[in-house]
Amino acid sequence: MPVDQRGPSDTPFGQPCTFERWPDVPLRALAGADDRFFPLDLQRRLAAQRLGVDVDVIPGGHLVALGHAVELADRLTIYASGLP
């Protein structure tokens, strides 16, 4: 690893999440239809259980931003247009 680049943080998996509820903001769950790392059924189940929302599905796999950047940008634009 180059000297000017640091390694990944231990924080995400080294400390428990301490907030008690999600902030009072609109939540969305977006998933690639062909994600083999986190299959769509798993993402749907977790979004429903943990967030209380349905998953919006777009074409693509685990790295949807690389393979379907336009579709992702379009969907994020739609989400942003609905914000106050």
Image (spheres, rainbow, N blue to C red):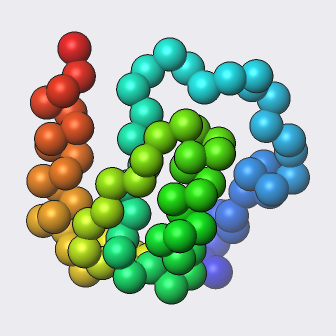
In the rendered image, is residue 46 in sight? Answer: yes
* Residue 53 screen position, x and y as percent: 47, 40
Task: Please indicate whether residue 49 sits to the left or right of residue 38 in the image.
Answer: right
* Residue 70 screen position, x and y as percent: 12, 65
User: Along the line of sight, which residue is nearer the eye, 7 or 63?
Assistant: 63
Task: Please indicate whether residue 66 sits to the left or right of residue 2 in the image.
Answer: left
User: Where's the C terminus, which quadrant?
Assistant: top left
From the viewer's perspective, is residue 10 above or below residue 54? below
Q: Residue at x 25, y 80 (%)?
A: 67
Task: Please indicate whether residue 25 sits to the left or right of residue 15 in the image.
Answer: left
Q: For residue 34, what is the image quadrant?
A: bottom left
Q: Residue at x 73, y 57 (%)?
A: 9
* Residue 43 screen position, x and y as percent: 54, 62
Q: How many marks?
A: 0
User: Along the line of sight, which residue is nearer the eye, 41 or 17?
Assistant: 41
From the viewer's perspective, is residue 55 above or below residue 20? below
Q: For residue 6, what is the image quadrant?
A: bottom right
From the viewer's perspective, is residue 6 above or below residue 2? above
User: Where's the N terminus, which quadrant?
Assistant: bottom right
Q: For residue 63, what is the image quadrant?
A: bottom left
Task: Please indicate whether residue 15 sits to the left or right of residue 32 in the image.
Answer: right
Q: Residue at x 39, y 41 (%)?
A: 28
In the rendered image, is residue 5 in sight? Answer: no
Q: Residue at x 22, y 46 (%)?
A: 76
